[in-house]
Amino acid sequence: MSLQKQELSSVIPDLRELSLERLAELGDSVLAHSIALYRQRLKETGVPLSSFGARIS
Amino acid sequence: MLITTHSLSADAFLELADGAGDSVVVRQLREAQLSKHLMLLHVVAEAANGTHPLSRATAAFRAGYQLLVEAQAADPSVVARLLGLPHIGSWAHDCLACLDKGTPPDFGYLAVVGAAAAVRLGIPFEMEVPVRDGRVPLPGLGCLEAVGQGEWVRLSCDAERLIVGGCIDVPCAALVPDDGSGEAVPHWRGTLLARAVADGQAWEVLLETADRYLDRYTLPMLTVMSAAEVTNWRRLIQSAWELLVRHHEWAAGPIAEGVPVIVPLVPRSDLDSATSPAAFGSIATSLPPSPVIMAETLVHEFQHIKLCALMDMLPLIEPGGGRGYAPWRDDPRPMGGILQGVYAFTGIVRFWDVQRHVETEPDAVLRASVLCERWRLAVELAVGPLLDQGLLTPDGVRFVSLLREQGRHIQHGRVPAEAAEIAREVALDNWLTWQLTHTALDASAVAALAAAYRQGEPADEQAVPRAWIQNDVRKIDSIQRSRLLVMRYQEPSRYRQLSATGDMPGLGLADALLVRGDAAAAVEAYRVQLAAEPDPAAWIGLALAVHRLSPMPSQPVFAVHLPLLFEMHACLADQEICVDPLKLAAWFA
């Protein structure tokens, strides 16, 4: 399948349509994988307080 | 319950990899960031619910959460907009970091988030909220000030009026951002709001000067602004917006879609701007000197915002790997930083490529043309090593390859020769300075190579000494010369003035000859200078001067092996053997 026809699946769970009430009832397991991935990335890249402002001419 | 994940259409990916991405694509990124915020909120909520006994902070969290539930039932779009703000992303990120470190997160902040939603929607509530420095922030709206010295205060709202601590009474209708049209309200400081409009296109952006979760950049947030400063910021944003809408439409709409907040920074001598992956939608910057630079800054930082959001969805690069040359920095950078820079400067090339046709005054045209070519060369130079390092994921390889194609496309619209020449030389100056500053060499191998040279052995039969990147191996004092070379396009009239008078402040003879454009005389002067002292700055000057002469075989040697030339020359000088630098370079050629 060519790239043009693909839909690229991300690692972020789609929670837009989930009410906050239901979000609170989700429990640990449903989001565990995504949260673990996110935590792992934070651990690998450090706390991203990045500044890209040091520009030179 | 089955939860799907956000997806990105291949077209959106291609648009982003082209350095752009329209408003629809940016909306997709923004919606994924909202989900990220909700995911992190879930983590914080689990932690708050697991805290026993219930503390004041966790009780405030629960009250805030409950208020958000009510607000969402009343108007989901208001809550979605609030929870999508960079304030919330930043807070949630910091909470996660605290939890992972085993320190208590700032649970109480969610109470003020809930209060902000309730005030906005006219929902009655009563709860305690945390106070910091006598203030209670209402994210996206402003902050209540002078509410007392306690750490907590009770807010009571009947949908019409907000009572703070039982004594301060503020009408809810007044609790809005400050767009400059309203009267001052005691105890209320609305977040500054700039409304920029051009050709029917509007951009509303908050100037955040109070919320501590957006005071997270290298420079501190500007927390106090005079009326004149506020006016100046608003005018600059309006003018930059007009420029973007009229000439850089590819960037304007997406910026309006994806940037709800600017964080003004305390100014230093130079312009500083920044973004943080933790705060999607927020651009921090000191006050740019002109509308054009404000527009450039917005384009630059928005590139970072888009890439950070994309990388939250699709990892493009693996951690680790070595550090390398980033042509927009003085220091060695990790590959992730180089990827960020490549993306930012792809946008900047696009900006100046258009801007060089927008400008009408010759000096401004020259400047825009040089900046277009300068950064095009930078992207071209950085992309190769990025692809070669093997750290990119398959998506990352596709992304960076497409970025490289974009650079080649712009190359077809070549800038005028004078601009190209200045850009090439400024880029070379940066590259040579970086190499000499941060390239370490195996000293014994250098000594062996120097001995081989002295004995007249062929260079191509010698082993090249091992080299590695190391911070600040040599101290190089060439800033003044570099500034004057840059002045040719940044301040052309001043450069012409200095050239006419022959007054080159702070420069020695060889540097002055180079900056004035007498390359042949500069080469001779650098040779004399290097015979007296193996100065790395003089080596860079010599390399620049040599590159201005007609093509010769040793030019690539200066560009690629300058640290080695310097070390060999210094090694022989230590043995009181004076070597002509041109002959040494010719040996390698």
Image: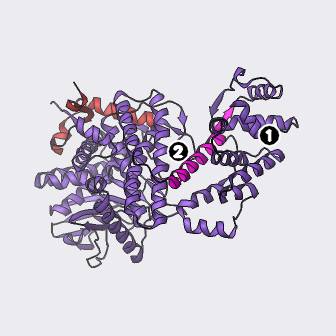
Which quadrant is the N terminus of chain B positioned in? top left
Tell me the residue at 47%/65% (across/down): B362
Which residue is at the far bottom?
B183
Give yes or no for residue B415 being in the magenta stretch.
yes
Q: Nearer the viewer, residue B390 or B460?
A: B460
Label 2 secondary element: loop
Which quadrant is the C terminus of chain B positioned in? top right
Which residue is at the far top?
B461
- The crowd level at tag 2 (other Cα within 10 Å; few <14, some 14-19, many 20+) is many
Q: Color of chain B here?
A: purple
Res. B387 image quadrant: top left
Q: Earlier in the sequence, mark 2 or mark 1?
A: 2
Residue type for callout 1:
Asp
Q: Nearer the viewer, residue B550 or B36?
A: B550
Mark 2, residue position:
B327
Q: Nearer the viewer, residue B503 or B171?
A: B503
Horizontal and vertical percent for residue B364?
46, 64
- The crowd level at tag 1 (other Cα within 10 Å; few <14, some 14-19, many 20+) is some
Way the structure is coloured: by chain
**What is the span of residues highlighted in magenta in the rendered image?**
B414-442
